[in-house]
Amino acid sequence: MSAASDDSTTSQSTSANTTGEYSPAERRWLLQLAHTAIRAAVTGREVDPNSAPASSPATPHLHQPRGAFVTLHEDGQLRGCIGSITAYAPLDETVQHMALAAALEDPRFQPVGEDELDKLQLEISVLTPMFPIAPEDVVVGRHGLMITHGGHRGLLLPQVPLEWGWDREKFLAQTCRKAGLPEDQWKKGAQLEAFTAEVFGESSPGESLR
């Protein structure tokens, strides 16, 4: 498994983008699954059958191995974001694992408390496989980036430069910074890879559960 944190900070959902590989029903089910996993772990109680998602929609997408990130927001602020860039498990399992990691293991935050559960607003990013890319081919808003050099590695999701208003060069520089590298390392032999993501989330806390 390859997990990483991300610096997405927006409180706005991207669920308005209704086109993509995953249907609205599949998206809603995955968001419910993430909420249910977090609640069970934080409370230490068995999952309430009335709050757990119904049986998985009968679609192969949810069981195909895919990398994914789960992002948590609370009161408009980032509360946790952890993901796997590697398709090491079926998507539904990955979403559960990353939701728990974002809630309990993001080193930037204290673990989510029980009093926060009803305040969490979730977003899921399902990743395509990585592919090499030249800096001049990076498209802001389409590509996420991972940069690797000398044992350092940093990743930013496609939505991050849009949230911060970055142009392509700023996006490249900030990905270097995320890796702990000089901001111009993308010009100096670092390995640059890209991916795209289908991003969907809630417009208000717990929206998918209602």
Image (cartoon, rainbow, N blue to C red):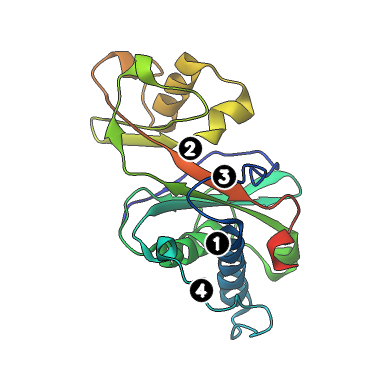
**Residue shown at 56% from the left, 20% from the top:** 166
> Circle 1 sits in a helix, a strand or a loop, which is it?
helix
Q: Which residue is mark 1?
A: 26
Q: Is residue 107 visible?
A: no
**Residue shown at 42% from the left, 67% from the top:** 93
> Circle 3 sits in a helix, a strand or a loop, which is it?
loop
Dots 3, 2 in contact, CB < 8 A: no
Identify the mark at residue 56; answer none if there is no mark: 4
Q: Amino acid at mark 4?
A: Ser
Nearer the observer, disc 1 or disc 3? 3
Task: Give the CA distance from mark 4 to mark 1.
Answer: 8 Å
Task: Give the CA distance from mark 2 to mark 4.
Answer: 27 Å
Q: Earlier in the sequence, mark 4 or mark 1?
A: 1
Dots 4, 1 in contact, CB < 8 A: no
Nearer the observer, disc 2 or disc 1? 1
Quick check: 63 above or below 43?
above
Identify the mark at residue 19; answer none if there is no mark: 3
Could you tell me how many numbered marks the image carries? Answer: 4
Residue 208 pos. (x, y %)? 69, 62
Residue 169 pos. (x, y %)? 45, 14
> Circle 2 sits in a helix, a strand or a loop, which is it?
loop
**Residue shown at 76% from the left, 67% from the top:** 210
Q: Which residue is mark 2?
A: 157
Q: Earlier in the sequence, mark 1 or mark 3?
A: 3
Q: Earlier in the sequence, mark 3 or mark 4?
A: 3
Q: Amino acid at mark 1?
A: Glu
Q: Amino acid at mark 2?
A: Leu
Residue 102 pos. (x, y %)? 53, 56
Picture quadrant of residue 122 = bottom right
Quick check: 183 above or below 197?
above
Nearer the observer, disc 3 or disc 2? 3
Q: Earlier in the sequence, mark 3 or mark 2?
A: 3
